Amino acid sequence: MCIWLPNWPSQRAFVAKRQADPQPTDIAKDSDQKKEPVGPILLYRRDPRRGNIIATANQMARQAGILPQMPLSQCGLLCPSATVVEHDPQSDIEALVQLAESAQCFSPIVGLESLDTQIWAGRSLHEPQSIYMDVTGVSPLFDGENRLAAEVIHWFRQRDLIVTVAIANQIGQAWAMANYSFRAKLAQKLLQMELGQCDDSEEQPFVAINDEAMEQHHRSLLFLPIEALRIDLATTAKLHRLGIRNLAQLSELPRNSLPSRFGDSLLRRLDQFFGREEEPFQTICSTPELNVNASFEYATPNREDVLSRLQIQLRLLCSRLDSLGHGALRVVCRVSLEKNALDVSSLPTADASLDPSSRQQLASVLQVGLFIPSNDPEHLECLLRTQLESQACKIGGDYWAKGLATQITMSAPVVWQQNSLFEVESLKHRDSIAKLIDNLSVRLGRENVVAPTILNNPLPELTYSWRPLTGWRKDGQQQEIKRKLGRAPKRDYQSEERAIGPKKEDVWRRPTRLLSPPIALNVTEFSNTGLPAIVRYPRANSNVLRCTGPERLESGWWEGTTQQRDYYRIELENGVWLWCFLDHRKKGWFLHGIFD
């Protein structure tokens, strides 16, 4: 099964804006009640040559004439009331992975689409937008494939997301049907959702199921466009110049001539589409050999007993990882509990109130994520023991442990590299730093162990954001944190002689301490040029020895009220360097940073 989320970045921004602007409380919770429209949404990105351009836009913005790759400066007149947000591919992949993990309620084998080095034809962004799901043997549990697909669509609609679902025996066919079977209707459906006119009760599911026994299904696949093969733009352009628009026309070409004229990728994609070549996909769940389950002979309230059983399971899992040449990136441990030493599963089910589907499953879940792959059982035990000994774990008292299940939900190959002859001092303790980050993430939470990320914004207070050290790359792969820690440090200007004044290329061009928000600067006296001559900092007046500038910064129209600032580096008589700016809109001086 392939689940395509059309225009995924815009849909994520739509859900985020609707959650940020909740509906009024006086609106009744009626299914017939329409929601308020969210308005046009633009997501822009920074292009090294063209500046800020549109990465993607929702349907309301496209109705106004805004398309991807358009300069952002041209969108102000077309759609002045649009919500403009910088495109964040990292947040897109993080949210998509969370959806895929939650979708494991339908199938235990779930993954994301894998991308090529070049962007596919028909797409404007080089990032995953589809979820793969192995539904072999799952459809009978939902009374057929149509009912299963309808349940999946309903599950996503509860999260205000529009998806298309396709089921086929090959990944290529499922992807092609999900992405190109309903494009004409999808634009109208997305527009209705953004306008608040999407009625969930209407039965218009975007479901495509390929039955190979029926000839009409095979014929419908041949009339799909050639972009459905997931080929690059250059190959698509060559085929279009030859007048080849669909798969039926492409199938008439001699097979032996395809590699020499279009490269090996076209023939490989064609074979994957028709099932002549198998195509695997990377799952985000654990494999069967990386799962260990055990039930205790007697329920126990002692955490030491659970810890001893956990040590045995971790050693077994690490030995399996070692044989595969992999290391764990995420470990999940589920401790089954029973209350008051009473096993709920042993109760009779004759009473309707004790139906198995209505029982409350008691369990404590321990989960840790690692920054580098590790198959060291002692390190994994140290991370899990921290959560086992915390107050959040309910073992003890009225809750007794009756079973333990440990699984490696994510792993990666362990790469061994030879150390350099002369080891750099900054790279000497990177393994210890990675283990320290693991422990801090377990104790404080992943969202609290962060690192700064530079953003393309002219305003100094908006030039960075804090993001977790762990996460996913834009292509859906795990980040190589150890490689990041192994980068050589930048030049250290603090170890050099004190400069007379900051140069344009120096890091001292920016202060080491940034005030957020900027505070008003008390200027006691001005010079003949209109610059500060005497300022009050911190509690007494001080003469200004040197005032260097200006450095003019101006924000874009898409960020609300335009900010126009002239920044100056002011050296005081007491030896303090200040970073101040003149706000032309407020007609005042503000202190924004201090050079330590």
Image (cartoon, rainbow, N blue to C red):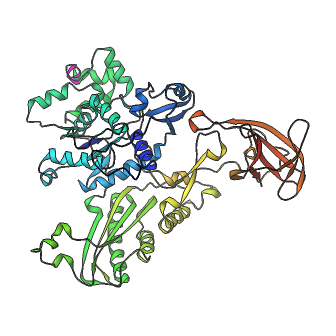
Looking at the image, residue 484 sits to the left or right of residue 288; the answer is right
Query: Among all residues in the image, which is located at the extreme front?
Result: 26
In depth, the one of 199 and 122 nearer the eye is 199
Query: Which quarter of the figure has residue 188?
Result: top left
Q: Is residue 267 something that shows in the picture?
A: no
Answer above or below: position of 512 versus 4: below
Q: Quadrant of the N terminus?
A: top left
Query: Among all residues in the image, which is located at the extreme top?
Result: 242
Q: Quadrant of the C terminus?
A: bottom right
* Residue at 34 percent of width and 79 percent of height: 306
**Does the magenta portion include 250?**
yes
Spot occupied by residue 152 in the image (x, y as percentages of width and height): 24, 48
The residue segment tinted magenta is 247-251
Query: Which quarter of the figure has residue 588?
Result: top right
Answer above or below: position of 349 versus 535: below
Majority secondary structure in the magenta region? helix
Spot occupied by residue 90 in the image (x, y as percentages of width and height): 47, 46
